[in-house]
Image: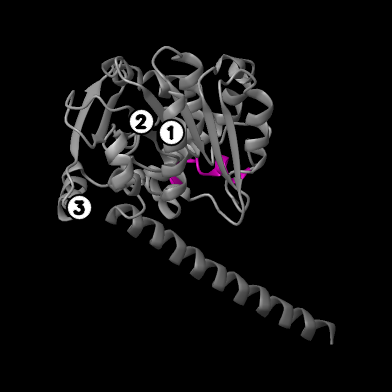
Amino acid sequence: MVIARRSITLKILKSTFRILKYLTGIFVLLLIVLNLSGCFQFRSSNQANIKEFRKKGLTLFANGYDTGLHHINYIRTEPDHSSRKPVILFVHGSPGSCKDFKKSLKDSTLREHFEMISVDRPGFGSSKFGKAEPDLDKQVYALHPLLTQLADRKIIIAGHSYGGAVAARAAMLYRNEISGCLIVAGSVSADAEPKEPWRKALDWTLIRWLVPKAMSVSNDEILTLRHHLQNIESDWKRIEVPLTVLQGTKDRLVSPANADFVEKMAVNSAKLRIYRIENVDHFIPFLQEELIRDAVIEMLPDL
């Protein structure tokens, strides 16, 4: 009887092992196919973006610059120096690209009141795609030539998710260039960063080869984000410009505690607005663009 039970248990284990091997094989094959096909790279070409806007009867322009360390690609709603409107500088999350804010770039109300620029952060889109920049300050430095080019304009920097940390840090460092800051579901608090031990496994050579490049770049910068956020905590008092936070209460990727953190730390902001939006998740730029529109229009008199 004992031998029979052992035999049955062994058969079950063998069957389970075969199923796991089969499922693992399918998973690995899927990752390879997605990687080779370009799916989940979270980007599109400038030509594709311009063509998409043209179909809607809207103009879009593309440009770029080199910092010596990075090449930064961006799209904008006006040609260089053609407008005296205030500027919204959009900074995407991780992973992502300049196209993440295409709904805002198409918005007729925003186009009437602002020039809008959306950048590909280092390692994403057409900004040396696949080459990560895990240093938060270097991410911000990469934007400085663009801020300098717009030095005679009022600039609201608006960042989503990881881009929220970039936007906040830019407001700390470039207080003469930036007139307002909008953080949309921003990862800005070290203590609120989620514990994700699986991210270290994504850094293994074999796994990096399997997963889409955009995911590897994202993992590289998120692995170090907590450390950088800890280092800049004392600099939140440097933000003196109007600051608005949009945070969904149903956000499962960036904790709503980030909004609480900003409310506590941004004590010198000229006008601090914290909006905790019921039943809204992380993807505000894609699904609730009107929240961004209303927030920047509200900031306009304060610039």
All told, the count of numbered labels is 3
The residue that mark 1 highlights is 158
**Three-letter residue code for mark 1:** Ala
Please name whichever residue, 88 or 300, is drawn nearer the observer in this view of the structure.
Answer: 300
The residue that mark 3 highlights is 52
Mark earlier in primary sequence (1, 3): 3
Any magenta on residue 203? Answer: yes
| Residues in magenta, as a range | 196-208
Any magenta on residue 133? Answer: no
Which disc, if any, is residue 89?
2
Q: For marks 1 and 3, give the CA distance.
A: 23 Å
Q: Which of the 4 quarters of the picture holds residue 226?
A: top right
**Three-letter residue code for mark 2:** Leu
Residue drawn at the location 19% of the way across and 35% of the way down: 62
Q: For marks 1 and 2, give the CA distance.
A: 6 Å
Q: Is residue 235 left or right of residue 105?
A: right
Q: How is the image coloured?
A: one colour
Mark 3 in CB contact with mark 2 (< 8 angstroms): no
Q: Position of residue 26 (x, y in %)?
A: 44, 66
Residue drawn at the location 47% of the way across and 39% of the way down: 295
The 10 Å Cα crowd at callout 2, few under 14, some 14 to 19, many 20 or more, is: many
Is residue 55 depicted above or below 61 in this figure? below
Mark earlier in primary sequence (3, 2): 3
